[in-house]
Amino acid sequence: MKTLDKIPTGKIERATQLVKTGIKVGGNYVAYYGEKIINPSLTKEKLNEENAEDIYDGLKNLKGSALKVAQMLSMDKSIMPQAYVEKFSLSQFSVPPLSAPLVRKTFKKYLGKYPEEIYDTFTQDAVNAASIGQVHKASINGENFAVKIQYPGVAESISSDLALVKPFATRMFNLKGKDSEKYFKEVENKLLEETDYVLELKQSIEVSEKCGKIENLRFPKYFPDYSSEKILTMEWIEGEHISEFTAYNQDREIGDKIGQALWDFYMYQMHYLKQVHADPHPGNFLIDKNDKLVAIDFGCIKQVPEDFYVPYFELAKPEVINNPELFNKKLYELEILRHDDTKEEIIYFTKIFHDLLSLFTKPFHGEFFDFSDEDFFGKIAQMGEEFSKDSQLRKMNGNRGSKHFLYINRTFFGLYNLLHDLKARIQTTTFRKYIE
């Protein structure tokens, strides 16, 4: 794979790259509609493939928050066209890496030494490259390490990237009112946290210590002496990403075991620690040789405040969902319904969220849930398709819901999809045994 000697970091450079991508996508639409005149039976499959290819090619060299958006979109398998899911999922652990000279320069700047002065061995080529950093394998006295190096300029470009995206997002989601800024600020703050490897080191050590008692779950050891704000060194653990494992695994018991560890890990964090690993994509988990789940990335940790946690999980209870008065009360507490809503908006959004929550919270309605249930995921996909075609929804004020929904909902979307890939059958309450 071609390596990068430079990443565009200036606002104009990055905007120019995005404009070029937009022109390519526009050309694809012109070609599609021209061909459609000749061949009316033509579907959008080819158009989606070409657009996904061009958008991904445009983002992968920008890295940082631009590529992170693609990574987040690839997790929503039930909503995105398959061509986008397949292409954008490459952003999880397969993008053009930094060149060797740029890697050495980063080491010298942030650890004061070149890699060969710190480690006995250090792979010149990255073994994985994703949206914010890339990983190299190193060793000292026979002990192997995974060394994550952050791309130059990523943190500095986040604000300008979001400024470019903001006008499109505002129109796309019909955000009205000054308080819509809270959503962009939430994303910006979390992305900035992900670029702080000192914070990630602290979070990694804390989470691995607190969750170390969960069965069939393990974490790498971390090494502060070989880490800095842009370099993070941890134990090297042999394994394969969940997506690689699920591509061939036919053993339902192993899938159940790994899935149970994943579910217990997330429920323990959510209900006991009141903070959660909010980036559950396949690139952040390995399966080791003993079929244990390995969590390897803690850059994105979302705190769950009590005034959000309580009504959020009360809305997962059938007795609340099916009680109109209680249900309405919780919708206001979570800012889904607004006090300036019209009667039409109240009726409309109450129905939408009743339908949505009645379906999406089903895993919480009993002691057991089968995430291989195609009917469940088919209904989620169908609901997403209906929302995308709903002209009335596009006219409503989309500025609603607590800012905490952004990362908590993203967490559950990602978790459900990983469990679906594992075809896991879950005991939903076993996490409670780990709570002291």
Image (cartoon, rainbow, N blue to C red):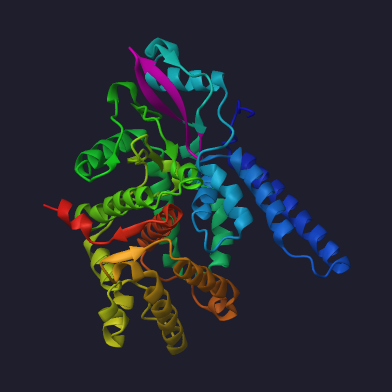
Identity of the residue furthest to the right in this view = 38
Instruction: Report the residue at 27% width, 57% height from top.
Output: 304
Instruction: Locate residue 425: give its quadrant.
Output: bottom left
- Relative to 62, is 25 above or below? below
Q: Is residue 117 left or right of residue 97?
A: left
- Relative to 310, is 417 above or below? above
Q: Is residue 211 left or right of residue 393?
A: left
Quadrant in which the N terminus is drawn: top right
Which one is in front, 377 or 127?
377
Q: Is residue 114 visible?
A: no
Whole-percent x and y of residue 75?
49, 54
Instruction: Locate residue 373: give its quadrant.
Output: bottom left
- Relative to 22, is 171 above or below? below
Q: Is residue 218 visible?
A: yes
For the magenta stretch, what is the residue range?
129-149
Whole-percent x and y of residue 35?
85, 62
Instruction: Report the residue at 32% width, 40% height from top.
Output: 292
Whole-percent x and y of residue 236?
37, 27
Whole-percent x and y of residue 97?
56, 30
Instruction: Report the residue at 43% width, 80% height from top.
Output: 349
